[in-house]
Image (tube, grey):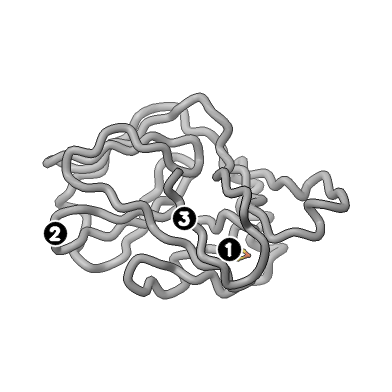
Amino acid sequence: MPIRVRRKELRELGYTFKTDKPDFFNSNSMGNNTIYPPIKSPHFIPISEMPEAELKAFQVESIELLLRRESDGSITAWPGACPHEGAPLKEFKACKNEIQCEWHGLKFSGMNLSMGTKQRAFPGGLLLSFGEEGLSVSPKDVESVISNSDIAGKSKSLSLDH
Ligand code: FES
């Protein structure tokens, strides 16, 4: 999918990008440019909808979540839109705990949530809580860009954990 097509698709959902106002620094760095739109209300994804060991996409308002239920009962979560420039991460292969975005080569570690996890901050200004019934997704009132100050180049692994 060409980047301009994906950008148009995401803009229609409310996404913006740091590089919408380009300057010397944001135009020349491999940073997290995707600004996810806020969600308005809490959502719940039942555990029965999450297949084990298989990546599945879930739509939470304008935000797509990629979830995989692990054999130990935990789940691993990634944002559906690449934090760098918004590529659809579900199109790429997850290898162990990482998805490598094929657009520019960055790797993203998923956020692993064990049973009983409460209110972990996730890209998109989301709070994730994981219990026996499933995953609760709530909005939070903070800046929604992942804070990774150390993104310098291609093929660097990024973590969604803070
Ligand atoms: S869009 Fe650039 S690495 Fe994903």
Query: Of discs 3 and 1, which sits in the foreground?
Result: 3
Disc with the residue nearer the chain's start (1 vs 2): 2
Q: Which residue is denoted by mark 3 in the rendering?
A: 159
Q: Which residue is mark 2?
A: 72
Residue lying farthest front? Answer: 150
Q: Is residue 56 left or right of residue 14?
A: left
Identify the residue shown where x is 51% and y is 67%: 107
Q: CA distance from mark 1 to mark 2?
A: 29 Å
User: Which amino acid does the dot numbered 1 rest on?
Assistant: Ala
What secondary structure is found at the residue carrying circle 2? Answer: loop
Crowding near the residue tagged with mark 1, few <14, some 14–19, many ≥20 C-alpha atoms within 10 Å: many
Task: State the residue in front, 63 or 108.
Answer: 108
* Amino acid tagged 3: Ser
Q: Quadrant of residue 75?
A: bottom left
Residue 69 rendering spot, x and y as whole percentages: 22, 58
What number is the disc on residue 87? 1
Q: Amino acid at mark 2?
A: Asp
Disc tally is 3
Task: Please tell me which residue is depicted at 19% across the width and 43% down the height of the picture.
Answer: 134
Q: Element under label 3?
A: strand
Q: Nearer the viewer, residue 3 or 115?
A: 115
User: For mark 2, does the 10 Å Cα neighbourhood hold few (<14), some (14 to 19), or many (20 or more) residues?
Assistant: few
Q: Is mark 1 within 8 Å of ligand 1?
A: yes
